[in-house]
Each structure stands twice: as C-alpha cells, then as structure tokens.
Image: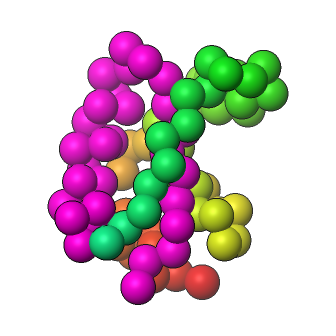
Amino acid sequence: MFPECQLFGTLGCHLCEVAEAELMPLVAQGLSVELIDIAEREEWVASYGLRIPVLRRIDSAAELNWPFTGAQILEFLRST
C-alpha cells in the first residue's frame, strides 16, 4: 500500500507534466496523488515556486524534489 501524496506544480509547467507521467504507472497500481497548483496560495508560491515539481507524502510531510525517476519515487514511497 502506498502513502497518499501531493504533487506541487502549476499549469503550463513542462517539468510538472513530466513528473505526472513518471507517477502514472504508480497511480495505476493504487497510488493516490492530489495535484496541487501552487498558484492558488501565496505561501505555496513562496515555498515551491523555484523547485516545482515537488512530490510530498501526506503521512510524513517528506518531500522529493525534482528531478526524480520512477525508481526514486518508489524508494521515496517505501521509506518511513
């Protein structure tokens, strides 16, 4: 079972689209990922604006900064 995650990004971000594509095989296996548009809150822009896309685990608040591969995502999801 995978932990629930959030992917911080924004519309028109090419790297965010690439990150989503990396996540899709895991979503097909049951990973739940909420897409968060950082443009919706000033604090998200301040925190994530220069480093999106960022994958965040809801359970631990751990973050995986771009660039990441499918293998790195799996390792991130399996860590505690």
Residue beneath the point at 78% across and 20% down = 42
Q: Nearer the viewer, residue 40 or 61?
A: 40
Quadrant occupied by the C terminus: bottom right
**Which segment did they paint magenta?**
1-29
Residue 37 % position (x, y): 55, 28
From this viewpoint, is residue 7 visible?
yes
Q: Is residue 62 above or below residue 6?
A: below
Left or right: 67, with 18 as reference point? right
From this viewpoint, is residue 64 visible?
no
Residue beneath the point at 72% across and 30% down = 44
Residue beneath the point at 42% across and 62% down = 32
Disc count in the image?
A: 0
Residue 2 sits inside the magenta stretch: yes
Q: Nearer the viewer, residue 54 or 28?
A: 28
Q: For residue 8, which quarter of the picture?
A: top right
Left or right: 45, with 51 as reference point? right
Residue 16 % position (x, y): 37, 32
Residue 2 % position (x, y): 43, 77
Q: Is residue 65 above or below residue 47?
A: below
Residue 23 sits inside the magenta stretch: yes
Residue beneath the point at 46% across and 70% down = 76
